[in-house]
Image: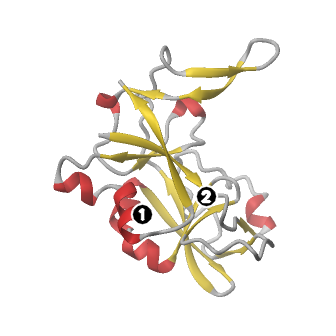
Amino acid sequence: MKVYIVKPDTSYRFMYPEDEVYDSDFWEFKCNELAGKLPLHFTAYLSDKKEEPIPDIAWIGMSTFAFKEAVAEYMVEILEESGELLPFTVNDEQWYCLNILQKADDALDTEKSEYEYNEGGIKFGLKNIVLKAEKLPATGLFKIKGDNYTSTFCVDDQSTDEGVLGSFFCAVASGKLTGVTFQEVTLV
């Protein structure tokens, strides 16, 4: 089994929700339900960097990932197992924003992980994340409290058919989807 941090691929265009949504109290993806809190069908726009291509999976509002309609349909079981899909449009095209609800709060190995410190010696971020394998979900995407639910993690367990079918990593690779990269995390 491997675990990855899912990161935006910066060679593709980013996405931004309309200001009213972005500036609302609810534009925070920290493992709390947002269905019924965010507007049902908000709009978003792509960055102005026209030389960069539009991805299949976009980083939206510096907070989470958004999926083209066809991609969300292709990955619906994996995505809905991990959270909720929130509909919105970009230039009249349907997209879905993923709000991850699955947590693995006990998975962070606080003794083996490395932290960043400010000048006063106060921890303010994780530099090298180490996770406890036995505390992880079997498949899907998840977040951890230890980084304030900011990073998106995915489990990639290719030892069983269920693991392959539930792997976000495998779905991205087999679908040749664009817009995300994967950084492997240390497991103990």
Quarter of the image where the N terminus is located? top left
* Residue 126 position by quadrant: top right
43 in relation to 11, above or below? below
Residue 180 picture location, percent across and down: 54, 58
Residue at 32% over, 30% down: 133
Horizontal side of 128 relative to 70 (left or right) equals right
Mark number for residue 9?
A: 2
Q: Residue at x 61, y 61 (%)?
A: 37
Image coords of residue 86 (percent x, y): 54, 67
User: How many other residues sit within 10 Å of disc 1, few (<14), some (14-19) or many (≥20)?
Assistant: some
Q: Amino acid at mark 2?
A: Asp
Q: Secondary structure at mark 1?
A: helix
Q: Quadrant of the C terminus?
A: top left
In the rendered image, residue 102, in percent from the top left (x then y), is placed at: 42, 46
Q: Type of residue at label 1?
A: Val
Q: CA distance from mark 2 to mark 1?
A: 13 Å
Q: Pointer 2 and pointer 1: residues touching (CB < 8 Å)?
A: no
Q: Residue 106 appears at what percent x and percent y?
A: 41, 27
What residue is shown with label 1? Answer: 172
Relative to 48, is 148 above or below? Answer: above
In the image, is residue 106 above or below residue 167? Answer: above
Q: Residue at x 70, y 54 (%)?
A: 62
Q: Earlier in the sequence, mark 2 or mark 1?
A: 2
- Total labels: the figure holds 2
Residue 56, disc: none
Give the SS element for disc 2. loop
Residue 50: name its quadrant.
Answer: bottom right
